[in-house]
Amino acid sequence: MSFHKTQSSAVKIAILFLAIVMMASSFAACRGGEEIEVVESDFSVYLGNTLDPITVQSVIDRFEAETGLTVEPVYTDVAAEPNSNLKRSIKSGDPVAAFLAAEGEELDGLIEESFLATIEDDARDVHSLVDGNRIAQSWRADGLISDSEVLRDLFGLPDAVELISDIQASSYEEFADFVIKLDEYISIGTPNVVNFAGKPYGFAEAKTAETAKLTGVFALSGADKTILGSRLMNVVLSEIDQETWIQAKSLPDEEAIEKIGPGMDVYLNTLDLLTSHLAGLFASGIRGDSWTSSKNYSVGEVEKIFMKGKAVFTFDSMGNSESFSKIDPAKADTLVLLPVKLPLGDLAIPDGKANSEIALTPKTSFAINAEVPEEIQAAALKFVEMLDETLLVDATSLEKSAESYWISGNYFPYNSESEEIRKYLKDSFKKNNELATFFATGDWTPEARDLIRLQLITAWKNS
């Protein structure tokens, strides 16, 4: 779902309650195959400052032509906070009938006050429902990002649809073997065979113009320890039993190390795999001082390495899709999200989803005001669904990819559900300066790994 900044707009909020009572005329509207009786009325919709007014107006025109109802869009200033004046617009004497809101404390407060109407899930195939009372419109997501066309060309396939599905379902062992053989294919062209979800895939005998540009497997920033630090650790902690970590805080050091050491090893082994196969702008990359230099491997430089086709994967947030589009709009339209593969072993939560999920949570959502009359709620919901469907058509490939994980249920929270784990990721983990030193170490000896392992566990104990 695309987002564009817009200028502020003076609007009139008009809901003609008296006209509804005195001049109501019924009409049938179809939503998800269900016939709804809606009374003719005017209403307004709060849209904040992130949607393109031209796109919105095109939907308003179609809605008004189809229903005979009029819709007033309510925008906020381009520089305003996401939910600026939202609460006032909902609770005013002429309240908005629907609204687009940023997820967070203010929206949580409105939910607690029962201001959000229930939305039936009869249109789940089209819309991503959240907790039965809102429709997700944009996302926060972390995962491996890859170009579907590069994946296609690596194996000489007509398209990458089945391949992507099999990579999503593949095990850590399959993916690790793929990474090692892919690095060899990139450097010397060895056409090995790899497996995803038990299916064999052979590298193409001849490289294409795109695969010939590759210098490594992963584009990653050693200069920014947040991405490969707290955000990668969030992936690890979301795939194992967090209660074990919380219990370990009250244990003596030796017992705590014994309890959470294996989980920290999952993180370090994953980090080792990713950073042992780095791409650079002109040649393959290696860990060490050059990799931790902001001149060579800042987040911006890493985006260039990836978007210029030098790496097959990057680990990043889909929130950077706008940056990707600025570098190469065509390539940005073929990007997909894939799960980070972890050597979980017996630590995996037994839900059958291990290594098939991404970190995902709604960023903004549409909701219906429960305080307006039911007939207005129904009309507003019809408009929101029309707008959401239109925005989905214009969505970036990463946004569509993220939504597919939500609909399939293959996701875990972008930030841990545990307040204690969140505090660890936000405070102790991000402030661990030894992690930056570890990144700058080219040879990750057992001694260096043991030291950073102990420091990270100690940071957790003391957070």
Image (spheres, rainbow, N blue to C red):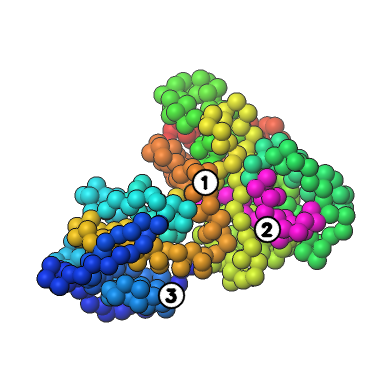
Question: Residue 263 appears at what percent x and percent y?
Answer: 56, 31
Percent position of residue 434, x then y: 57, 42
Mark 3 surroundings: few (<14), some (14-19) or many (≥20) residues within 10 A:
few
Gap in Å between the C-alphas at discs 3 and 1?
28 Å
**Residue 47, relative to residue 419: is it above or below?**
below
Q: Earlier in the sequence, mark 3 or mark 1?
A: 3
Q: Amino acid at mark 1?
A: Ser
Seen at 40% across and 67% down, the residue is 387
- Which amino acid lies under the numbered mark 3 shown in the image of this protein? Thr
- Taking the spot 21% from the left edge, 49% from the top edge, the residue there is 113
* Element class at badge 1: helix
Tally of marks: 3
Instruction: Tell me which residue sits at (52%, 23%) in the image.
Output: 259
Q: Is residue 162 magenta?
A: yes
- In the image, residue 108 sits, relative to residue 74, either above or below, namely above
> Label 1: how many residues lie within 10 Å, few (<14), some (14-19) or many (20+)?
few
Q: Nearer the viewer, residue 160 or 275?
A: 160
42 falls in the magenta region: no
Label placed on residue 408: 1
Image-based side of 45 in relation to 411, left or right: left
How far is mark 3 from mark 2, CA to CA? 28 Å
Distance of mark 1 from mark 2, alpha carbons? 20 Å
In magenta, the rendered stretch is 141-167
- Could you say whether the residue bearing mark 2 is in a helix, strand or loop? helix
Res. 231 visible in picture = no
- Which badge, 1 or 2, comes first in the chain's sequence? 2
Q: Does 19 appear above or below 225?
A: below
